[in-house]
Image (cartoon, coloured by chain):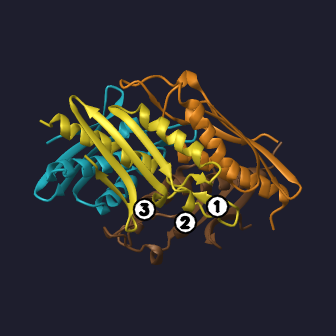
Chain colours: A orange, B yellow, C cyan, D brown
Amino acid sequence: MATDRENAVFEAAIKLGALYHQFVGTPISRSTAEKVEAAIESAVSLQPYVTHIEVRLDRTLMNENPFGYSELTGAMYDAVIETKFGNAVCRAQLKFENGYPMMKILD
Amino acid sequence: MATDRENAVFEAAIKLGALYHQFVGTPISRSTAEKVEAAIESAVSLQPYVTHIEVRLDRTLMNENPFGYSELTGAMYDAVIETKFGNAVCRAQLKFENGYPMMKILD
Amino acid sequence: MATDRENAVFEAAIKLGALYHQFVGTPISRSTAEKVEAAIESAVSLQPYVTHIEVRLDRTLMNENPFGYSELTGAMYDAVIETKFGNAVCRAQLKFENGYPMMKILD
Amino acid sequence: MATDRENAVFEAAIKLGALYHQFVGTPISRSTAEKVEAAIESAVSLQPYVTHIEVRLDRTLMNENPFGYSELTGAMYDAVIETKFGNAVCRAQLKFENGYPMMKILD
């Protein structure tokens, strides 16, 4: 059977995988980024075992296409999540590194 | 060649198809619905030829799963969009009717 | 009231907006691209008023990330759709042009 | 620092969260379900640390809307994934239980 720690890790990772694939492709710009961040955080905060979620989208990558906006890509994400399962806690991160939207356990 | 009216219709429909499939599946509840509506509206308003977008998600369908929240489904959507292309305008709607997320040209 | 031609245009555009936002972000590689194309085509072909759909994803853009695969992006798409509404037909395309996933009415 | 077992669990969960939110909303029917399953499996199999993935979508829930098809929902999913990280392995499942698309560690 899985330990509390394993379950906390499992739950954190589900949310990172989910938020990435739910929102990639969303039209976005520097002026609307805050609303998209708020929606993502509000969505993740509803999910089970989440105690904290912080999503920051990199405005410097929101370069304008010919119609003046961008699309949310994996490169823009910096998200930190905390989950609690029983007595165990997990903190994990989604952040672009070396051309890849890396997800990892922080502690 | 397409007329301005056809292009206005075309542009309105793209956005309805897009917003539907981008956001279906998002975790949502009555207390977070407003943030999701704001994010959808901000995303659509960036797209070309959009002059107005209004998204209303039906709270009465946000019934709680065992973990206390819902998922955005097609049945919840009521969206009205207006586009302008050249001198032509199109107003169109996405709304659940007879078990189907119907999209149609209003005028 | 909308004409058959306007409705054919409307229905074609819905599907292009939908397929774009449904599948962007899907992990993909040159060896799996065919299966993703087949799934997209099968999904679109179910939707109302569609008489033909062809989706081609540009393998030359499927460059490997550090883990050896890619993600479906707007730049990869070349899709042509035909819809029929009443006596009217519309053929439309999604194709990357000048840094933008351009959708347009072909005829 | 995270153990191999924790990382194997983490990687399995990322993929379950991802496949769920990437594909929910896809138009589907009993006759196209196999192609969608193949596309999902091919997508997940590309992702890091995945040694096995099997996705089965419940045809009995693919009831026809007025236009003769369905949409992929969480209730249809039965997915089992295996990941390997270092010397550790994780097997996990996504399956609808009690009105919820439950994800859990199998062993």
Where does the image place residue A46, in percent across and percent down from the top left?
68, 52
In the rendered image, the vertical position of residue B87 relative to residue D63, given as above or below: above
Of marks 2 and 3, the one in the foreground: 3
Q: Earlier in the sequence, mark 1 or mark 2?
A: 2
* Chain of the residue that carries numbered disc 3 in the rendered image: D
**Residue marked by disc 1:** D82
* Chain of the residue that carries numbered disc 1 in the rendered image: D
SS for callout 2? strand
At 21% from the left and 51% from the top, the residue drawn is C7
**Residue marked by disc 2:** D54
Where does the image place residue C45, in percent across and percent down from the top left?
29, 60
- C7 or A13: nearer the viewer: C7
- Label 3 – label 1 distance at C-alpha: 20 Å
What amino acid does circle 2 point to? Glu
In the rendered image, the vertical position of residue B86 relative to residue C49, given as above or below: above
Q: Earlier in the sequence, mark 2 or mark 3?
A: 3
**Residue marked by disc 3:** D36
Q: Quadrant of residue A96?
A: top right
